[in-house]
Image (tube, grey):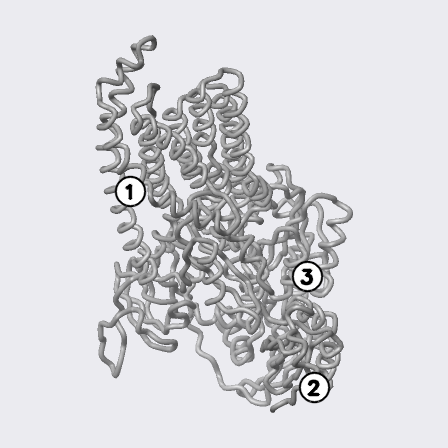
Amino acid sequence: MTQAISPLATRHPAAQARPTIANFSVLGMTCAACAGSIERVLNKLPSVHARVNFASEQVQVDYDHSQVSPDTLIESIGKAGFSVPQASVTLAITGMSCASCAVSIETSLNQLPGVTATVNFASAKAHVAYTEGLMEVRKLIERIRQAGYDATEQREVDDAEMAAREVREKKAWRQQLGMFAVAAALTLPLLLQMFFMLGDTQHGEMSMDLLPRWLQWLLATPVQLWIGAGFYRAAFKSLRAGRANMDVLVVLGTSAAYLYSAVLTAFSWTGHVYFEASAAIITLILLGRLLEARAKRKTSSAIRALLRLRPKRAKLERDGQLIEVDAGSLRMGDIFVVAAGESIPVDGEVLGGHSRVDEAMLSGESMPVSKAPGSRIYAATVNQLGMLRAKATGVGADTLLAQIIRMVDEAQGSKAPIQHLVDKIASVFVPVVIAIALLTFAITWWVSGAFATALVHAVAVLVIACPCALGLATPTAIMVGTGLGARHGILIRNAEVLERARSLRSLVLDKTGTLTRGRPELTDVLIADDTSIPQVLQWAATLEGGSDHPLARAITRRAQDESVTLLAVDTLETVPGKGIRGLVGDSEVILGSPAWLAECSVVVDTELDGKLDALLAQAKTVVGLAVNGRAKAWLAITDPLRETAHAAVARLKASGLAVLMLTGDNRHTAAAIAEQVGITQFHAEVLPQHKADQVRQLQTTLGGHVGMVGDGINDAPALAAADVSFAMGAGSDIAVSAADVVLIHGDLNGVATAIELSAATLRKVRQNLFFAFFYNVLGIPLAAFGLLSPVIAGAAMALSSISVVSNSLLLNRWRQR
């Protein structure tokens, strides 16, 4: 559509400005009226012309960026009751040298419309959420490059991606090692001369004759201008972006020492030259970065170890033949076979065979797990005994292993709340250090009258200051902690969870699937004198054969285990909430609650009737079986406790947590389970929609942070409401996605382990931050008062970062109680 431009508009250049056009999705529209509502809200904004397509759920907006910001558009849509979906991307960043670099990139990205970014210096990654249509990945990368760094989009973490990373890292390592070797060879003669000079403080000028000044200049110049060129480039880019980083400190300090010495040499003026200081500082910083890179690489070893577990080959069943194929080529529904001793290629369901599978790499549990038809098996676990035939149910990015890798990778790139304070300090750290160095130079020169002495003190201040130690203190500990959790079968969704978990004061436990196995079992079959257990199971399983009710499955599983043959059934009738009945041969068989049997006038003999109360007292669910109006058996069904439930509750209580149980089951069953596991406080008969309300009420009444453990769909709202939520790995997808921590092996002990691990990780963070702050608070004044030479300051700066990373790696020695 063309639009005429008035003569008046030609006299106003602003009126001719090309409008900004944005296209983005909107969620929540249910009819054309919704589309009209969004259009009206947007069109009220100055310079905005909006068109909403209800069918495609797309909005096209023409607007003047100088009058309306994209954030205002999104905010207006939100006020109208709709939402704009966010996309996310992970960018691998190169060129960062310190925490100030990470803060610079993060600040730059967050200035873009509709963008929320966090940058992790330790993992060299940026996790960015943005609004599609308002922003593109290409523009995000351009923004990072404008700030003086480089970035590439990181795809799904897989073998190819990790192999590419390792190739890049090895190449960069070799280049750094080569540069360091050259720098060390050129610097060594200068350092040897310095050591000789230490013994002659009164005749330092004579000591310089050990190496002529021209030779010192010849040795130092390649180190300063060639090997140190990377520092100059990084410093220039940082200053061009309006910020200062550690490279600026290094360049200022070494350049001052080098240029001062070069001027004395060029004009043959008297005075001590400091070529050894400038060269040694650059060499030591290169060494520090080499060691730091190697140590940081160990912090991400958890993901590398998980990726190495992926099997490369699989035996695919096709047309009755076994064909060996690439494991990555398997698709959903494919039938594959795993022999004893082989790794399982993808997630699947066992169709045939019996075996035991080592799942330690997923759950941290050393005991193998029995597998039979109907059992779930997982990629990268090891089949130990017999052959298994299975159907693929999860391939590629949908396997449990891939989900674990993805969650660990995301958690390692996230930030703990304490890191935001560190980032604020890092953002002003370098300018403050430069100011201190200038002040040191001015005061020292004024007091001593010696320009060279003032310069040396200022250079020492610039070189010893280390924002890297601050930047690495938190993320390296988080990376090790989350990786350690993965090895113990505990998936921690983000770093913030680690900080909150150690603050928990009370823990709410769901019953079914958390304290219990979540799989009802037929435990007791009490029969009348004129029948047998196999006959009772045959009648009951025949009626329940087509039902998917949990109690029905418990009966049919028991019948299958005892190889009971089912009979033909006619006129089957299900009475909701009561039971089921039908004709089996010539007999009318009824299976249902004792109360329903009484309604049906079933005759129960005295001996069988006396056994009912004992079963009910054990909080078991009892159903009765009657044939032709006479009771033949009571069948008791219960959801058995997890083997570790009692010990886990005792461990949680011993750690100082108040443990409560929340269940929708009846009060008698809840009381029995609570007594068995040692819980004194519980709430029974809580409807699913009220579970979240109970958690919020507990947050108010108990005070402090409240955790929630659950596994079912009905637990998801309560999990979301809790301060920290834990989901059993075998639970529903909704519960798992709502939880902060996922316990892969479904052991309640994992909750205590996760809390202990979070406390250990936070201890490391505090130790690292203390060391980093103490180092800078102590080192900068010492350098300012001339108590540290620039060379010693450079060595201390290089070692500070290594010490922080090494301390984080010590967390790998942590063991659960």
What numbered label is drawn on residue 226?
1
Residue pictured at 29% horizontal, 69% vertical = 327
Q: Kindly report which numbered mark, 2 or 1, lies closer to the viewer in this rendering.
A: 1
- Classify mark 2: helix, strand or loop: loop
> What is the distance, in whole Å, between disc 3 and disc 2 at their CAs?
41 Å
What numbered label is drawn on residue 31?
2
Residue 357 placed where, x, y %?
A: 35, 58
Residue 450 placed where, x, y %?
A: 45, 18
Q: Amino acid at mark 1?
A: Trp
- Classify mark 3: helix, strand or loop: loop
Position of 679 with respect to 225 (left or right) is right
Residue pictured at 52% horizontal, 76% vertical = 541
Residue pictured at 39% horizontal, 26% vertical = 790
- Classify mark 1: helix, strand or loop: helix
Q: Residue furthest front?
A: 267
Residue 410 placed where, x, y %?
A: 48, 56
Mark 2 or 1, nearer chain start: 2
Mark 1 or 3, nearer chain start: 1
Residue pictured at 55% horizontal, 33% vertical = 435
Tell me: residue 704, above or below residue 547.
Answer: above
Name the foreground residue: 478 vs 741.
Answer: 478
Rendered-image quadrant of the N terminus: bottom right
Mark 3 or 2, nearer chain start: 2
Q: Amino acid at mark 2?
A: Cys
> What is the distance, in whole Å, between disc 2 and disc 1 at their CAs?
66 Å
Q: Is residue 647 visible?
A: no
